[in-house]
Amino acid sequence: MYVAVKGGERAIENAHRLLAHERRGDRDVPEISLSQISEQLSLGVDRVMTEGSLYDRELAALAIKQARGDLIEAIFLVRAFRATLPRFGATEPVDTGAMQVRRRISSTFKDIPGGQVLGPTFDYTHRLLDPQLAGAGSPEAPATAEPLASMPRVTDILGRDGLIEPSPETDADAPVGDLTREPLSFPADRDLRLQNLARADEGFLLALGYSTQRGYGRSHPFAGEIRFGDVEVEFYAEDAGFAVPLGAMAMSECQMVNQFKGSATEAPCFTRGYGLAFGQSERKTMSMALVDRSLRARELEEEIKAPAQDEEFVMSHSDNVQATGFVEHLKLPHYVDFQSELGLLRKLRAEFFEAASEPLKEAAE
Amino acid sequence: MVTVAEMPAGFADKVLSAQSTFRSVMDAMARPGSVQRIHAVPGTPAPMMRGTAAIALTLFDHDTPVWLDKAMSATADVGKWLKFHTSAPVIADSAASAFALVGNPHDIPPLDRLALGSNEYPDRSTTLIMQVDSLHAGPAWELIGPGIDGAAVLQATVPANLFDRLAINAVLFPRGIDVVLVHDDAVVAIPRTTRLAAHGA
Amino acid sequence: MNATAYNFAYLDEQTKRMIRRAILKAIAIPGYQVPFASREMPMPYGWGTGGVQVTAAILGPGDVLKVIDQGSDDTTNAISIRKFFARTAGVATTTSTGEATVIQTRHRIPEAPLHSGQVLVYQVPIPEPLRFLEPRETETRRMHALGEYGLMHVKLYEDIARFGHIATSYAYPVKVNARYVMDPSPTPKFDNPKMDDCPALQLFGAGREKRIYAIPPHTRVVSLDFEDHPFTRYRFDAPCALCGADDSYLDEIVTDDRGSRMFVCSDTDYCEGRQAAGHRGTESAAPHKESAHG
Ligand SMILES: [Zn+2]
């Protein structure tokens, strides 16, 4: 006798209990705290905030803990939480020119007003595992310097002489698009593209940006400037009639200076690619800037032939929460469809062998 | 002038009233010509009927520009009530409206002055909400189309030329206008796929 | 960071309004995919977020909800979604097709005929029937706008040239109300005829792809075919081994590693209902059979 499988509900509950147990790990090891994650795994927290589209270090740390360190799962948790939050409006654009800079480098000029500020970077570290870090340590206090009053953006310096195109302006009164509130349609404007890229998977953007460097939509990029630091966020309150400061956010910005354009009627100038992210997310903003520039192919009248220039391709596949859901949904049962395919395949095979045996029959007759 | 305190109230239970109203409208749209009842009873600013008010509270918000006919905009009451309860912008350009509220069915604008959608996005079209004197008496109309098992008979006091004018839906499909008729707490939908049954052919 | 109290049926009211407006337009334009601003749900994309959002937007306290996956109420994802609504909306749930007012499904249409008080909500992974012929949304949207479906017919005809049959066994495209070509979601083509002239309202939700579409009751739904190669419904010749039904869609169950197989109804409610009514198959729980089959 055959008895159909039952008890799925119990199985799910047991699996979740086991998951909670595994998440905790060995109970003799002290439990990790949210502040430990936030302070000591801070770049992971930055990534979760950026791709989760929610600036909240504590929630991002909680998500990382709950996700057992799986950052895409953590991003998913943050996104699902964010989706239920009430919305009060949009902030004023942040002024990264007024950023309290903690790191700022340019690869286009040897020296610039405000100077090159290396800041906290892996750059020039020798990637040698440090056995001392395996234990507890107390690193030296960092050297301090007076913060510089003025640190103009390199693109603004270039822009003063018209050497780089002005930042493409949209009508100030036009509402900024929001792809979390409006279904996306193509062609998509740059505000939506940048939003999509800001939320996009870092690895996906990294690979696409890399592909442009290898000739799939080459854009001759120079890292005009990369800066990381704190910016003030303001919200225009209609009741009050003025912008109310909400506080400071740590952000990274990358401005790529790219392939110039020009025509008989237009003086040649460099073009822009832009990247912006929460926290210190340098790889993300650099990749984003490369892909932003390549997605501007349509407006810059470049031939669209590489994946990174194809906005439908990029925007439809950049979101890791969507991608992981759909890839992983293949583990859900599909046996009804499989049965349908199996039946069809058996039928086609039977017909194939029948047809193959016919010439033999004819020969025997 | 109506102050906020004097403003007719919205739903007592926003969540469940909106849900039950939506189901009535959904059933109406899914079964053209059938009369559905709206059970939630909000306050109403004249000349808005309670069915219309319930639909507005259920479907309107700041993303849905609303156009009002002369009857609805005769005083500022309807516009104020809509703004207070739904945040829906009341606009003068009917062609940009998500919803058009018609208090006088004999004075509807030419349908091509409403949003008809595009062939690519036929959903970007106006839903016309029209108040009528009766949805159980008056001339009988025999309707066919998706949602209707065979033919449906609608008895309603709608303008005699309404269906002539809705013939635009057959010509333009998938573009078109979807109509919701309201009388008191009763609703009937005439989506763009509904046609008058041909007779005597 | 308090435990957040979520709204009835989880979604906030603004989101429900947006989805409800999309549903009404979907019903008004049968088979047309209405774009909607799908929200991030607390379950992964591809696991029914579109169906869940549609269900959440229509569900009321008086509803009786049934959730099936692969035809069964007891598959893990069906259980998970049913629990989600039992918890967030407090609705009554059932496994009975006849008693349900709202049925959310993945990959099957129940065997028992649906009635006019019911809404069938499909979970849809890829709503665009032309997507695998033309990956670009801008192109497929133009084809739908013009009602230009030659590409689909070419594909189906190439199947015939190659295999002698249309080699699509699930997600078999249909034409709705003689206008839009529509993806029925990955249901087996066995289920396609049930969509035609169905008394229940059929709603389709694709969360990741952000589309909602609908088939109103009593709407003409035709599976695409050719005069010389008409649509055929595929089914095994065997009856169900548990209830003896010869009119239901069957799951194949591998019973040992020597190639033994049996076939049982995919629709567990239908199968159990028949067994309760006294119908028997070869593997039914009769004592002598039990020993015969170990
Ligand atoms: Zn059976």
Image: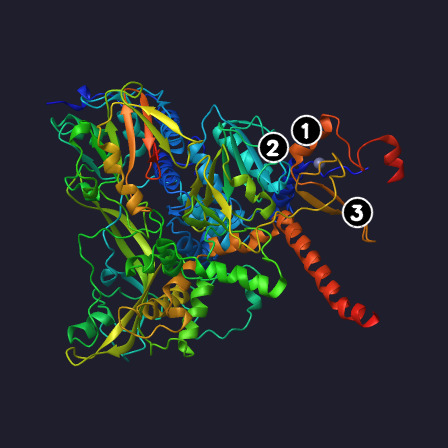
Q: Which residue is mark 2?
A: C112
B150 is higher (above) or lower (below) than C75: above
> Do callouts 2 and 1 mark residues in contact (Cβ within 8 Å)?
yes
Query: What is the C-alpha distance between the residues marked 2 and 1?
Result: 10 Å
- Three-letter amino acid code at the position of disc 3: Thr
Percent coordinates x, y for residue C94 in the rendering: 59, 28
Q: Is residue C250 left or right of residue B129?
A: right
Quadrant in the rendering for residue A279: bottom left
Instruction: Check the residue under mark 3 and report the chain it is in.
Output: C
- A351 shown above or below B74: below
- Under mark 1, the amino acid is Gly
In this image, B198 relative to C44: left or right? left
Measure the C-alpha gap from mark 3 to mark 1: 24 Å
Which residue is at a point 45% across and 32% down the rendered structure image? C9
Of residues C106 and A210, the one nearer the viewer is: C106
Looking at the picture, tell me which residue is in the foreground, A164 or B37.
B37
Mark 3: give few (<14), some (14-19) or many (20+) Cα within 10 Å: few
Which numbered mark, 2 or 3, is in the foreground of this view?
2
Q: Label 1, secondary structure: give it.
A: helix
Nearer-the-camera pick, A38 or A210: A210
Specify whether disc 3 shares its chain with disc 1: yes
2 and 3 marks on the same chain: yes
Residue C255 marker = 3
Question: Which tag, 2 or 1, sits closer to the chain's start?
Answer: 2
Residue C273, labelled with which disc? 1
* First of labels 2, 3 by sequence position: 2
Classify 10 Å Cα crowding around label 2: few (below 14), some (14-19), many (20 and above).
Answer: some
- Image coords of residue A364 (percent x, y): 84, 70
